[in-house]
Image (cartoon, rainbow, N blue to C red):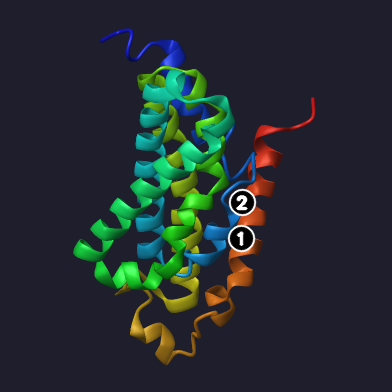
């Protein structure tokens, strides 16, 4: 048990959450971050979907890494990811159909997410299953919490709600408060992501 949660494995899990975050540091997965963060609920679902797919794709590729011919490794990785995306998409349609409709083609486009392919090629293909699983969970959550943060800000200021529940009291609107319609536009997702990246780098990469 202690070996499973060794310092090395803890670093594998924790590093993508902050020090080498796929969005904040590597600037990967930006396209979906712009597309699905107009509200909090689809942002959460997309984040969880990417986390699950990344973790299990990592494990599968790690298990078969020594049997994959080098010439076709990218094709095999794409097939594994595509199969997992199809399964997740069907689960979403079965249990959260409204969110599945809202996410539309973006669930299918997880197949092309640079975070997944990057972790499969850079980590899972050369490491054992357990560290690969932790790496997938860490990178997925590192991606997910950025989506959740951006989605929460956009929904709160753009619609006055969170998860569909009205947060800003009606009395505020009676006094003249108006939702910021710009927050619902895709351009604001890009701006917010840029601001978060700027703050992160300013805080963690200060010049000596």
Is disc 2 surrounded by few (<14), some (14 to 19) or many (20+) residues within 10 Å? some
Q: Residue at x 48, y 70 (%)?
A: 38
Q: Nearer the viewer, residue 180 or 175?
A: 180
**Label 1: which secondary element:** helix
- The answer to whether mark 2 and mark 1 are in CB contact below 8 A is yes
Q: Residue at x 37, y 21 (%)?
A: 129
Q: Position of residue 42 (x, y in %)?
A: 38, 64
Which residue sits furthest left? 95
Residue with the mark numbered 1: 192
Q: Position of residue 30 (x, y in %)?
A: 59, 54
Is disc 1 surrounded by few (<14), some (14 to 19) or many (20+) residues within 10 Å? some
For residue 192, what is the image quadrant?
Answer: bottom right
Q: Nearer the viewer, residue 71 or 141?
A: 71
Q: Position of residue 10 (x, y in %)?
A: 42, 19
For residue 64, what is the image quadrant?
Answer: top left
Against 206, is 27 above or below? Answer: below
Q: Residue at x 44, y 26 (%)?
A: 13
Against 36, is 141 above or below? Answer: above
Q: Nearer the viewer, residue 67 or 163?
A: 67
The span from disc 2 to disc 1 (Cα, nearest Å) is 6 Å
Quadrant containing the N terminus in the rendered view: top left
**In the rendered picture of this protein, how many numbered marks are placed on residues?**
2
Residue with the mark numbered 2: 196
Q: Is residue 132 left or right of residue 203?
A: left
Determine if residue 72 is in view.
yes
Q: Position of residue 54 (x, y in %)?
A: 42, 39
Determine if residue 19 is in view.
no
């Amino acid at each position: 048990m202690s070996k499973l949660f060794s310092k090395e494995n803890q670093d594998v899990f924790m590093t993508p959450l902050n020090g080498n975050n796929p969005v904040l540091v590597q600037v990967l997965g930006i396209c979906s971050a712009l597309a699905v963060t107009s509200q909090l609920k689809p942002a959460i679902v997309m984040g969880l979907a990417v986390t699950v797919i990344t973790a299990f794709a990592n494990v599968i590729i790690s298990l078969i890494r020594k049997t994959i011919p080098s010439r076709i490794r990218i094709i095999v990785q794409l097939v594994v990811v595509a199969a997992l995306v199809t399964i997740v998409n069907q689960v979403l349609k079965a249990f959260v159909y409204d969110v599945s409709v809202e996410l539309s083609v973006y669930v299918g486009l997880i197949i092309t997410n640079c975070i997944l392919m990057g972790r499969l090629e850079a980590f899972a293909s050369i490491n054992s299953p357990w560290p690969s699983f932790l790496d997938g969970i860490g990178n997925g959550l590192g991606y997910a919490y950025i989506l959740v943060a951006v989605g929460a800000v956009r929904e709160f200021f753009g619609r006055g709600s969170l998860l569909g529940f009205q947060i800003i009291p009606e009395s505020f609107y009676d006094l003249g408060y108006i939702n910021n319609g710009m927050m619902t536009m895709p351009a604001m997702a890009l701006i917010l992501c840029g601001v978060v990246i700027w703050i992160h780098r300013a805080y963690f990469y200060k010049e000596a």
